[in-house]
Amino acid sequence: MKLQLASGRREDYLKEVLPVIQFSAPEIQKEIIRIESMAATKEERAKIAFELVRDKIRHSFDIQGEQVTINAGETLEKGEGICFAKAHLLATLLRGMGIPAGFCYQRVLKKGTIGSGYALHGLNAVYLDGPGWFRVDPRGNKPGVDSQFSIKEEKLAYPIREEWGEVDYPNVFTEPLPSVIASMRESENCAALFDNRPEALEG
C-alpha cells in the first residue's frame, strides 16, 4: 500500500499533541532514557519501543478492563489501553526519541461478523532513514493475532477483508483523529467504548 501523508513536513510527525502526545512528561522521559540506553540506532530503538507497547501494555478489551486510558502517560502508568491508547503511547515514545511517527486507521468488524458492526482500529506509521515510512501495529498479540516490527513486509494485527466491508485506510495523520479522542473521553468505561468507537474516517 502507498501511504498518504497528511503533511509533507516530517517535523509535523515529531510534535507533541497535548495532552495526548506529551513526550516531555517525566514518566515518558524515564522510559525514553531506558530505551536509548539499550540500543544505539533509531531502528533498534523503534523496535524496542514497539515491543514494549505491544507486549507490556495490556489491551483493555483482552483483559476485560474497565478504565479508559487515552493519554500516553496514563497508558504507560496504568499498563493498559485499547488500540488507540497504545498507538498514542508508541507515537509519543518514538517522537520523544526523534523518530517521526503518525497515526493510521483501519475499519474492521467489531466481533468478526457483519452483524456485529464496524469500528475503527488504530495503529502507527514510522519513518526511518533508508526504508522511509512503514506501518506497525502495537495492538498486542493473542491467538490469531501476530503483529511484528517488520520494515520490508507489513505484519499487522488484522488482515483486511474488503469483501466484508473492512477498509485499510492509507492515511498517515499527524494527530489522533478528533472523533477517536471524543469517543474515548465520552465513554464511562471500556464496555461503553467498545460500542462508542467511530465506525469510519470522518468525511
Image (cartoon, rainbow, N blue to C red):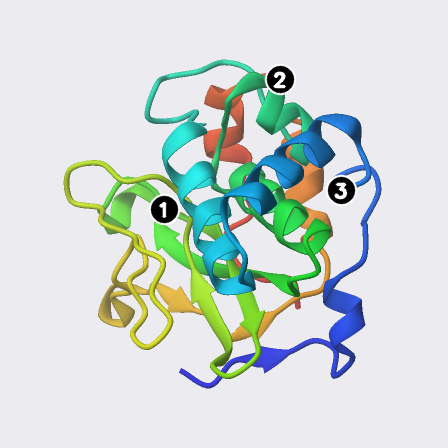
> Horizontal and vertical percent for residue 178?
73, 50
Element under disc 1: loop
Q: Viewed as shown, does residue 21 lie left or right of 5? A: right
Q: Nearer the viewer, mark 1 or mark 3?
A: 3
The answer to which of 77 and 201 lies nearer the viewer is: 77
Q: Position of residue 11 (x, y in %)?
A: 79, 71
Please, is residue 96 above or below residue 201 in the view?
Answer: above
Report how far apart the C-alphas of labels 2 and 3 lie in the structure.
Answer: 26 Å
Residue type pointed to by label 2: Glu
The location of residue 38, given as percent across then percent down, is 50, 43
Is residue 165 visible to the viewer in this orientation of the structure?
yes
**Which residue is found at the position 72% from the left and 50% from the top?**
96
Instruction: Report the disc number at residue 23.
Output: 3
Q: Amino acid at mark 3?
A: Phe
Please give the name of the residue rendered at 46% of the width and 86% of the height, measured from the top-left corner. Answer: 2
- Disc on the earlier residue, 2 or 3: 3
Disc on res. 188:
2
Cβ atoms at labels 1 and 3 below 8 Å apart? no
Res 134 label: none
Q: Residue at x 62, y 33 (%)?
A: 31
Q: Secondary structure at mark 3?
A: loop
